[in-house]
Amino acid sequence: MTTKSQDALAASNTAGESIAPLVAALSLEDKVRLLTGQTAWRLYAMPQIGLRSLAISDGPVGVRGTGEIPGATSLLMPSPSGLAATWNLDAARRAGTMFATEARRLGVDIVLAPQVNIQRTPIGGRHFECYSEDPYLTTQIAAAAVSAMQEAGVAACVKHYVANDSENYRTEYTSRVPEQALREIYMAPFEHLVTDVGVWSVMAAYNGADAGDEAAPMTEHGHLNNDVLKGEWGFDGVVLSDWMATNTTVESANGGLDLVMPGPGGPWEDNLLEAVRRGDVDESVIDDKVARILLLAERTGGFGDAIPAPSRPDDAEFLRKLAAEATVVLRRGKDYVVDAADVASIALIGPNAVNAYVLGGGSSTVHPHYVVSPTSGLTEAFPNADITLLRGGSALVHTPPADLTRDATDPVTGEAGIAVTELNTAGEIVSALVNPTWSGWHSDPSADCTDVVLETNLALRESGEHRIDVGVVGAHRIFIDGTLVSESHVEVDANVILDSSANSPIGSGLTITIDEPRTVRVRVELKTVNAGGYGRWVRADFRHARPGPSIEDEIVEAVEAARNADLTVLVVGTNSEVESEGWDRVSLALPGRQDELVRRVLEVAPDAIVVVNAGAPVLLPWLNEAKTVLWSWFPGQECGNAVADVITGKTEPAGRLPWTLPSSESDVPIMNTAPDADMVLHYPEGVHVGYREWERTEKTPAAPFGHGLGWTDFDYGTEASARVADDGTVTVTLSVTNTGSREGAEVVQAYVEAPSPSPAGIERPIRWLGGFERISIGSGETSTVSVRLPRRTFEVWDTASHAWVLPEGEYAIALGRSVRDLRTRTLINLPSHGGTAPAVREKPREASAPSQTAPSA
Ligand code: BGC
């Protein structure tokens, strides 16, 4: 018996001439073995056919590597939404090339990036990893990055297919997305990357999707994987599972998944072999998966020896410029560019001035070669200025990390560090060592180790109140000076990685007040955590708050410094406790008392420049009180240099928001990501996602989609012309003048408004981004700008025929600087045929059934 999915598979026929004999040369056992990872980051080698082990690494803020090179560090880019904020496809291409070089340097063949899920809600924990709330901008940036990466022979793995747009219950929910929105918003980037760019791998998401006629986990969604992705779109690459996402054998094997990650273990291996022998999974289905993996290997140079590693690319200048160009000027005062010669003193204030948050939390984490702090950046840019750095109060909830290199010693030998003792089930010592550079993790303990004891004497030097905490995961006991401060018998598993709770574990401890310096003995007993594909380990963060000023004292001190400085730079933002994969935020407020800090500083230093260091939207209740406000994203390794380059005008902050900045939570279209009792996550807004919903409700955001002032001004010509090419592409042309005193880059945005009324049953947004063009224009100069709007922009997914249609009529194209700053309009009449192209050009959804052909135009 063949299923609809298998028919679609056969239709996509991936096995090329050179691949088929290789598949045939493998035994069934070897073929099935190849379909589960050998490790968390590697596939099996098959030396009999010359296949080496392919290596995988996470993205999308850099390439972390496989963990096999001790101490490996990486280039750290601005967060993906920062890249999207440039609206600069050349920069996205360059980023793609950088990913490829980094991948090869670290011995990697497949990079798990980019992430093209849509920023459906600002509370989404992975918002910073996505590009935009708009599918077109997402698609364009991703396409440039993927094509450059793959031209260099490294596979992109575009993720997470599909409707994986929030983190609450992320492995459990099923997204029920209306069909039109699923196609036009959530699947659109994947479709383009498959059909137009030819991406080599796709990651099946943790969540399920309810696509109307089939609701299933994405690792086994026959319709979306086999019929649409591989059938209708003709995807010839590998569908690999998100890490530990696969829960079935037969359903996932027949449902379009090609590769279970990570390995070893998981639901395939011997179970799949038996399923094939039983006849529940056809061997041709296995062959197709193997062929796809071998094709991927061929594309990435996986036959033969490992590819020699290039030397570390010198991309510092590029990353510096990128982070500065991505910066969005939300507001600006009169004299916005600061002349370093005029500044003798700088008050640099804020929790994020002290500890900039340069990358968000979760699997995208890389270990950067270095990070330029705001202090270093400003010191270099303002050589004559005295810089006073003040935190203005902590914005963290957890006790800060202990200074272990300075304060921790082995209680027995007095050596610096944490004593680590592995025990077996009988409580006997398996191994013992002192770790002088405790990272918070003890990984891969000896095979018979079931428990680990960590001990240290922590030096308390200053008199006053000290707080000591240990953040742990799973079953444990924590003793401080012999007092049991926390105990749990609850053992945990890989879920603590999936929900990121292991990254920032909750701490327990004691407050100790001292008059004289002394040490405290900290003893932590931990059960090893068996996290499946994420390995075995124990986790403990040692934390220590010393006696010090209160938050109020710190704010007062910061205000005084601002009052006396020539220039005040405030850096506020989120931190690792706030923005991360694994959870959605519960509030859009800046953590701690940062809003109060900004307001009190602005009272005495109204010209202060406020830099917001966050990935996803936060509320800025003081926005209209500040003269200059910059949004600097998670800027990556060049953080401080980029901030300095923007302030001094060395680089134009040309960023434009790829999402809407709300001014209150009650205005936000989607603030709740909780699935219902049946674990269904509803998408009632349909196609009205992000700014489209703001346009529908006519609420006023703090800053609209597309907004960004830069350091100069532009005028738009009053007239624009539009023409349609034979393939349905519309090109709109107008003139734009830089009326400011500096050269600058403008992003001309073209928003489409559909003919009114819409054909019956077809819901369309009020307006949507149809195209954009970024152009640099010298001061006082006028340029002619052409914006290309692809035919698909005008098409709509018709849920009656399950096909793309082009409603005929008069479309308006509004050109402007943001969705709320539209300057020039033009009209264009589109016939339903759209030039010579047929009105319906996609295959219908039953891709495998020959009797159902696309309706002709
Ligand atoms: C994330 C993926 C990531 C994978 C491997 C998962 O938890 O959802 O985006 O690539 O882990 O780290």
Image (spheres, helix red, strand yellow):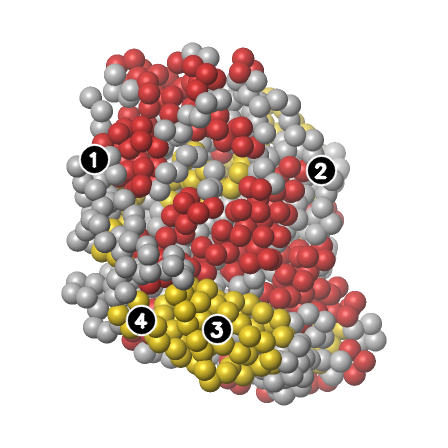
The answer to which of marks 3 and 2 sits earlier in the sequence is 2
- The 10 Å Cα crowd at callout 2, few under 14, some 14 to 19, many 20 or more, is few
At a point 44% along the width and 67% down the height, the residue shown is 731
At a point 71% along the width and 37% down the height, the residue shown is 310
**In the image, what residue type sits under mark 1?**
Pro
At a point 51% along the width and 26% down the height, the residue shown is 43
Q: Is residue 808 left or right of residue 243?
A: left
Q: CA distance from mark 1 to mark 4?
A: 35 Å
**Residue under label 3:** 733
**In the image, what residue type sits under mark 2?**
Pro
Q: Is residue 255 left or right of residue 628?
A: left
Above or below: residue 765 compared with residue 792: below
Q: CA distance from mark 2 to mark 4?
A: 52 Å
At a point 61% along the width and 85% down the height, the residue shown is 739
- The 10 Å Cα crowd at callout 4, few under 14, some 14 to 19, many 20 or more, is some
The answer to which of marks 3 and 4 sits earlier in the sequence is 3
The answer to which of marks 2 and 4 sits earlier in the sequence is 2
Above or below: residue 500 compared with residue 256: below
Residue 20 appears in the picture as rendered: yes
Residue 596 appears in the picture as rendered: no
Task: Give the quadrant of the N terminus.
Answer: top left
- Residue 379's image quarter? bottom right
**Image location of residue 36, percent across then percent down:** 44, 25
Q: CA distance from mark 3 to mark 2?
A: 43 Å
Q: CA distance from mark 3 to mark 4?
A: 16 Å
**In the image, what residue type sits under mark 4?**
Asn
**Image location of residue 432, percent across then percent down:** 65, 27
**Residue under label 1:** 850
